[in-house]
Amino acid sequence: MNKLLATALVWMLICGAAAAANNAPASDASIRELLELTNAQQMLDGMKGQMTAMMNSAMQNATKDQTITAERQAILDRMSAKMSAVVTDMLNWDDLLPMYLRTFRASFTQDESDGVIKFYKSPAGRAYVKKLPLVMQNIMREMPEFMKPVQEKILTIQRESIQEFKDLKDKEEAKK
């Protein structure tokens, strides 16, 4: 009887350890495989161009009612180049990979990571990965039109605030 009880106890410990192993955080190796299967680095690189295009579109909308001289265009071009450089630096894969590893490890168990990897290796998963850049490109193409009302409201708020500052300055100068 004691032998049977000891065997049952050992079996429960083994099963418990196996279950706990599946609930362990995802390994760096499985996270890296998942990132590779989802083309995360390529998507990040694609985001750089899309963000730059969106910023340029926003600049064009912001200056559409203004006369753009060659000097002003040069300033805008330098600003655009500087902003693109900031985005490129910010979206550097080598700098972001440790963050990806930490957040995936904190968010997924090994069992979940294995299941997601299995999905991305399936035909449906491969199709999803293949078509997702097109989906994102289409979303980014529609984003400027979607953002137009927000940009117009922000520009109105900016103009009103600039006018308030001007009025305040005039008021303060009148008191002197």
Image (cartoon, helix red, strand yellow):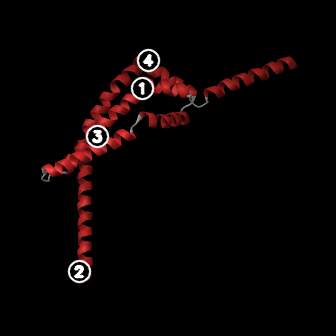
Corner quadrant of residue 159: bottom left
Res. 160 in view: yes
Q: Write down the residue under mark 1.
A: 38
Q: Going 13% across and 49% down the picture, which residue do you hit?
A: 70
Q: Are marks 2 and 4 in contact (CB under 8 Å)?
A: no
Q: Write down the residue under mark 3.
A: 52
Q: Going 23% across and 69% down the picture, which residue do you hit?
A: 166
| Quadrant of the drawing holding the C terminus | bottom left
25 versus 1 height, above or below: below
| Quadrant of the drawing holding the N terminus | top right
The amino acid pointed to by label 4 is Ser
Query: Distance of mark 2 from mark 3, alpha carbons?
Result: 45 Å
The amino acid pointed to by label 1 is Thr
Which of pointers 2 and 1 lies earlier in the amino acid sequence? 1
**Residue 122: which numbered mark, if any?**
4
Query: Is disc 3 placed on a helix, strand or loop?
Result: helix
Query: Is disc 4 placed on a helix, strand or loop?
Result: loop
The amino acid pointed to by label 2 is Ala
Query: Distance of mark 1 from mark 4, alpha carbons?
Result: 12 Å
